[in-house]
Image (tube, helix red, strand yellow):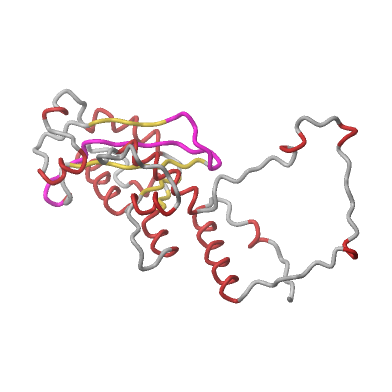
Amino acid sequence: MRQVVLDTETTGLDVSNGHRIIEIGCVEMINRRRTQRTFHKYVQPDRDIDEGAEEVHGISRESLKNEPRFPEIAEEFVQFISGAELIIHNSAFDVGFLNHEFRLADLTTTDVEDCCQVIDTLAMARRIHPGQRNSLDALCKRYSVDNSRRDLHGALLDAQLLAEVYLAMTGGQGALSLDQDMSGAKPKDRRIERVDGGVLNLKVVHATRQEIEAHERQLSLIDEASGDGVVWKKLDIHQEP
């Protein structure tokens, strides 16, 4: 499963007022693990940058004067994201700007969602944590993701932070090797230790209704984020407590 975590910085907040993308940052994950592949470009917007926006990301128009325009990087960008699940925080904002740039560049692809499935981590966070702050900074704090380098917003850094937050929100990286603890053992040491359950006097504690409902909500979120669906939901196992 290939996923791309994406963030952009722009000249302002409203694409309908002619604002443009000035930075794109993407990080790649394969089977929920970060790879070494990234996509990071600054873009010449051919317009002024709102003062409020510059205070957020610290990028000035002067610093972009020698950067490529979007049509010059568009093909490379589309190739990088094509076929992946795009993970974006507040996807409506970034996708709106990207689609606008696609149209201005007269690309064959004019809609991000034509070439990618989009997962909005803001909507996901609001379902998991209703009534709480769900900004990227708030989620970093909630999931113990170190964002101490985030003095200003930056597309690549924010994409890296969002990748860690997304993995934490959807159950961590998982994928433990069954032989992990036995990697140094000789074959003859790999014995099965059988325990007589009858002498353990174990207490069985059943999940409460609230815990079951919370578990089902988490499975639904993982199911939505996974290309193959949740394994547990495919099993036809029903046990009465």
Quarter of the image for the C terminus: give it.
bottom right
Question: Taking 232 as reference, is 163 above or below it?
Answer: above
| Residue in view at x 10 percent, y 43 percent | 51
Using the image as rendered, state which of residue 216 and residue 182 is in the foreground.
182
Residue 59 within the magenta-colored segment of the rendering: no
Quarter of the image for the N terminus: give it.
top right
| Residue in view at x 38 percent, y 60 percent | 123
Question: Taking 145 as reference, is 234 above or below it?
Answer: below
Using the image as rendered, state which of residue 191 and residue 177 is in the foreground.
191
| Residue in view at x 21 percent, y 40 percent | 57
Left or right of 59: which side holds 221? right
Give the magenta-colored segment's residue range: 16-37
| Residue in view at x 91 percent, y 59 percent | 196
Left or right of 230: which side holds 45? left
Where residue 211 appears, as percent x and y from the top left, is 58, 70
Using the image as rendered, state which of residue 153 and residue 200 is in the foreground.
200
Q: How many badges with numbers are in the image?
A: 0
Question: Taking 87 as reference, is 229 above or below it?
Answer: below
Residue 20 within the magenta-colored segment of the rendering: yes
Where residue 120 appears, as percent x and y from the top left, is 38, 54
- Predominant secondary structure in magenta? strand
Where residue 101 appears, as percent x and y from the top left, is 23, 41
Left or right of 190: which side holds 26? left
